[in-house]
């Protein structure tokens, strides 16, 4: 058994091997077990390739099989686009209407000031940039509706499995709920813009992929909102290097904040 992710007091995910089969074991707070299991069933009933929950223990433990295909997070470095932007939009648009009746989670942009303050406490030299970012993002989104579309809530390349340019799995669906399609697409753009530790060829590949996908996203959602909301997600991700105690966390944090600024400056 191998730990793959851990969020203190929220959840842990393990990979477990039995003979030649790979299973995923998710440990949740017991009070969230039923809601999570119901979300999996909701998507499966709608034809969305979510993992089937095979075991749901009262202690908060879920057991699910590995879905076919491979992570989009690996495929983004392929020489050719691993999947089309249209297919990703189609996946989100196929989320069932019942998702909009689930509890609403605040969009990432609503927390930009909180995350900016966290960063400023550890890197005061970035305070002016962070204040500029926060002001521009919040003022630019001040009149944007919260939306009532079915959304994933944390949509990025690590949550998607693909095979033969088709989606074969949608993961970590605890965040499902009502919102705006632009939030899901902005989350994906932000995560792609923040991929770390790439060589030159990988960096070029991600730039090409964003160059192909973002114009398609712009046709589906407001282009200004897309970039401002993506910048807000980048600010949230910029808290990561310090929290993970990475050796060069200050340089990585500066790079991420500059990435957020570049997104905002495309439209402001």
Image: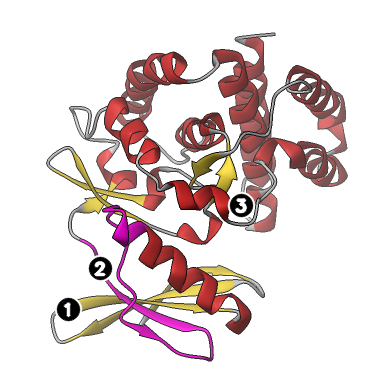
The x and y percentages for residue 53 are 34, 75
Disc 3 and disc 1: Cα gap in Å?
A: 36 Å
Q: Which mark is residue 66?
A: 2
List the single residue furthest toward the bottom. 58
Q: Quadrant of the N terminus?
A: bottom left
- CB-based contact (under 8 Å), mark 1 and mark 2: yes
The x and y percentages for residue 223 are 54, 14
- Residue bounds of the magenta highlight: 43-67
The x and y percentages for residue 256 are 62, 33
Classify residue 100 as left or right of residue 192.
Answer: right
Q: Quadrant of the C terminus?
A: top right
Front residue of this view, candidates 71 and 118: 71
Q: Which mark is residue 247?
A: 3
Q: Which mark is residue 21?
A: 1
Q: Which mark is residue 137?
A: none
Dot 3: element: loop
Q: Per the image, is 52 magenta?
A: yes
Q: Per the image, is 111 magenta?
A: no
Q: Depth-wise, is mark 3 or mark 1 nearer the camera?
A: 1
Q: Depth-wise, is mark 3 or mark 2 nearer the camera?
A: 2
């Amino acid at each position: 058994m191998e730990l793959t992710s851990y969020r203190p007091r929220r959840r842990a995910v393990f990979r477990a091997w039995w003979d030649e089969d790979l299973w995923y074991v998710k440990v949740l707070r017991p009070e969230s077990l039923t809601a999570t299991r119901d979300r999996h069933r909701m998507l499966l009933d709608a034809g969305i390739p979510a993992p089937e929950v095979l075991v749901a223990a009262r202690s908060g433990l879920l057991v699910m099989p590995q879905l076919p295909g491979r992570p989009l997070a690996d495929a983004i470095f392929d020489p050719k686009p691993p999947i089309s932007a249209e297919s990703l939009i189609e996946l989100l648009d196929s989320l069932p209407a019942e998702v909009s009746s689930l509890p609403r989670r605040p969009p990432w942009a609503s927390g930009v000031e909180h995350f900016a303050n966290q960063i400023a406490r550890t890197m005061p030299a970035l305070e002016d940039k962070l204040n500029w970012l926060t002001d521009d993002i919040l003022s630019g989104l001040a009149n944007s509706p919260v939306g009532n579309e079915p959304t994933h809530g944390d949509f990025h390349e690590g949550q998607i499995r693909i095979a033969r340019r088709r989606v074969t799995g949608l993961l970590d669906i605890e965040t499902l709920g009502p919102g705006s399609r632009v939030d899901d697409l902005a989350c994906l753009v932000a995560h792609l813009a923040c991929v770390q530790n790439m060589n030159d060829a990988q960096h070029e590949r991600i730039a090409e992929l964003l160059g192909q996908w973002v114009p398609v996203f712009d046709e589906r959602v407001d282009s200004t909102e897309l970039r401002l909301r993506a910048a807000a997600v980048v600010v949230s991700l910029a808290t990561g290097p310090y929290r993970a105690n990475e050796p060069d966390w200050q340089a990585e944090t500066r790079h991420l904040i500059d990435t957020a600024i570049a997104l905002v400056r495309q439209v402001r």
